[in-house]
Amino acid sequence: MRRLPVYLLLDTSGSMAGEGIEAVKTGVGTLVSSLRQDPHAAETAYLSVITFDSEARQLVALTELAMFQEPELVATGTTELGAGLGLLADCIDREVVKRTADTAGDWKPLIFLMTDGEPTDKWQDGLDKLRAVKTGGIVACAAGHSARVDVLKRITESVVQLDTVDRGSIRAFFKWVSSSISVRSQRVDQGQGDSGGLQNLPPPPPEVNVVL
Amino acid sequence: MDVPLAADDEGGAAGSAERILSKGAWQAIAPFLREEIWFRELTRDDPRMQTFLHDETMRNAALRTAIARAVCDGWRAMTRPAPMPAWPKVGQSLSTGAPLPEEIPVDSLRRPVGSPPLRSSERFSLANARAGVAYRAQIVGSASGPLSPASVRDVRMPPEFGLQWDHVAGEVVGLPRVAGDCALVFEWHGDSRVWREGRCTLVVVPDPDTLWKEVDPPGPGEDIYYKAVDDTSRLDGIVAASCRGRSHAHTGQARDDDFFVGADSQAGSGWSVMVVCDGAGSAPASRWGSRLASEAFGASMLEQLKAESGIEVIKDLTARGFDEKQAATSAGRRVHDMFREAARRAVRAIDDHAQEKQRSSRDYATTLLAAVVNRLGGRNLFCASLWIGDGAIAVYEPGSHRLMGRPDSGEFAGQTRFLDEKTVEDPSFASRVSVTLRPTATAVALMSDGISDPWFKTEAELNSGQRWDQLFEQLTPHLTAADADRRVLQWMKELSEPGHHDDRTLVVWRGEGLAPR
């Protein structure tokens, strides 16, 4: 079966502690349970969670939605964005099946990145690794105004920003991520392809501002 | 030494039980009790009973005493005419629900049964279950790993999920009936041997099959491009069926696929024309693009084949003492020109319509698969095809097939080509045309990717003869039936494959077993 891989790359640095990380946890939970109600996503979407703080970790390997279990997220340490991007590239390279004569191949992976601060490492190295793998679109979310929008813009065209790192806006962001995955899984099911950035995703809610 | 039973309101009976059930008596009745359904029922929620049942030596005197008492309770309950009461919790008498005396120690565990449970920082998880799929899983602790049957007791969960605790295996088992979050509360102990309270959520995910909805598309009054969700046709040797996929049905969208079938029955030249178009899902009016293109292309081909050029092709192929390769090349060149002309007309039909509606032609983007077939008076089978986009065209006979081209697709799935001026005028257009002469061929099939993708999961399978044989094994009984088109439609609707719910269209020409023209 052609899977639709979805990677959540989440900043779990110390600055996310408290309301921020709790809202992200809730967001991931809501995301998964609402996608399970959507037959397109329930059949095709596979989800992985990668976090980065002082180091990058893949907390959940690419897992079919039905079997996905929410990981425990703890906010601590620095913001090694480059390590996160590098690990993401490794995971995509390892987990996403390319199409050959004998295998159907997966759809191109959809990536959602969320960060609230300034990278503390050489993020360009990680970005170079990520450039080497094929993706079906990266959406980067700057949570609050401490996040470096200019850095995110270097990673992807599709950058959105939350004015505040609070429960309401993070919930709105994850709700939008959820409907974006629904729409993409429907698109691939109808043979409409697996590429494109924001223009192929549903319009974000008012809490989520598109950075032009 | 046996621990004496504390005096309570059940004291008399329990006391006699202890007398009746000496160690020897226990050993005698234990196998019998294990077989007794009432006893199993009686003890199923009580891990102490299970410990006993699986402790053949019954060295634990205190436990034996507790069991003995419970057995007596059970016997009394059984002889009572009224139905058994609801299963009591741990720490309650099995018959009366009254609290058991606290001084009954269980093994070396320090916390007696019935005292308030201790909280723990350990996190527990259970593998997710699927509604309607048999389930069996152990509780897993974040630090202690899978919990053994002896280290878990008093597992409680809402009954509506249809799941229960199997204390023998130490697993949650059952056939989950409903989807949702099933919250479990239980007691467990780790190395410290202290019973603590544990909680975990078992997620029962819905069966995706039950989530699909069937929503009508906008009706003829609401949508100028309205067309029926299903369509079929039978014409001479051709059976065609097209249905809306689950994906479109779920969201109330129309069928984007379309087809055209035609035969030159009047002139008797024996030409059949088949076209399958799959409107691009990303194009808002592609459902009409597929209709315009298939009709314009099909009509143009029929017209050309009936005219001089079609007659020339037949002459090429039936000339006395003809060189087969040369004839096929010559006929191929003629058909190629006809295909290009028909494709131009199809592109023009879309362009004209788009202009009239003041829309972009891209709004009507569609793929196009076409084949023309001639039996050449029964001596041979000539088939020429045009392949733009995904899907499949093949000339088939049992044990052998010829794929009439290659689907347009890239390294990752979902990349295809559409019919447009660029494709038609490009020099590579010729590579999209195939011709073949196969005297023993029995069928020609055209299908949209809604069928080729789920049926041939890989390019290797598309090229494998076995998969084509299997396809025709399934299809032949339907194709030869009196209501062949409806039967094929039904067959394609039942073809189920996760992640493949696109519109489906199949057109099959069969060279035998059909009414003569």
Image (cartoon, coloured by chain):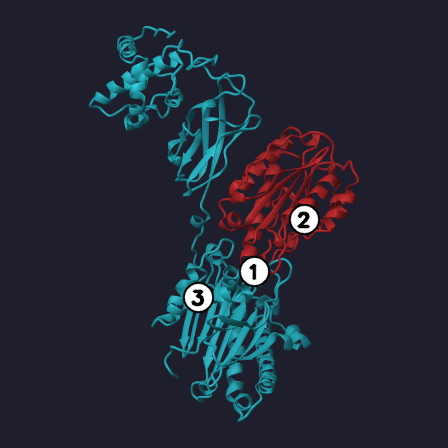
Would you identify the image quadrant in which residue B92 lies? Answer: top left
Q: Colour of chain B?
A: cyan
| Nearer to the camera, B352 or B44 | B44
Q: Chain under label 2?
A: A
Is B164 situated above or below A174?
above
Q: Chain under label 3?
A: B
Q: Which mark is residue A93?
A: 2
Q: Secondary structure at mark 1?
A: loop
Q: Are marks 3 and 2 on the same chain?
A: no
Q: Colour of chain A?
A: red
Q: Secondary structure at mark 3?
A: loop
User: In the rendered structure, which amino acid carries the disc numbered 3?
Assistant: Pro
| Nearer to the camera, B112 or A123 | B112
Q: Are marks 2 and 1 on the same chain?
A: no
User: In the rendered structure, which amino acid carries the disc numbered 1?
Assistant: Thr
Task: From the image, tell me which residue sits under label 1.
Answer: B458
Task: Tell me what residue is drawn at x 41 percent, y 63 percent.
Answer: B491
Calculate the distance from the C-alpha at mark 3 to the C-alpha at mark 2: 48 Å
What is the quadrant of the C terminus of chain B in the image?
A: bottom left
Q: Is residue B146 among the parts visible in the rendering?
A: yes
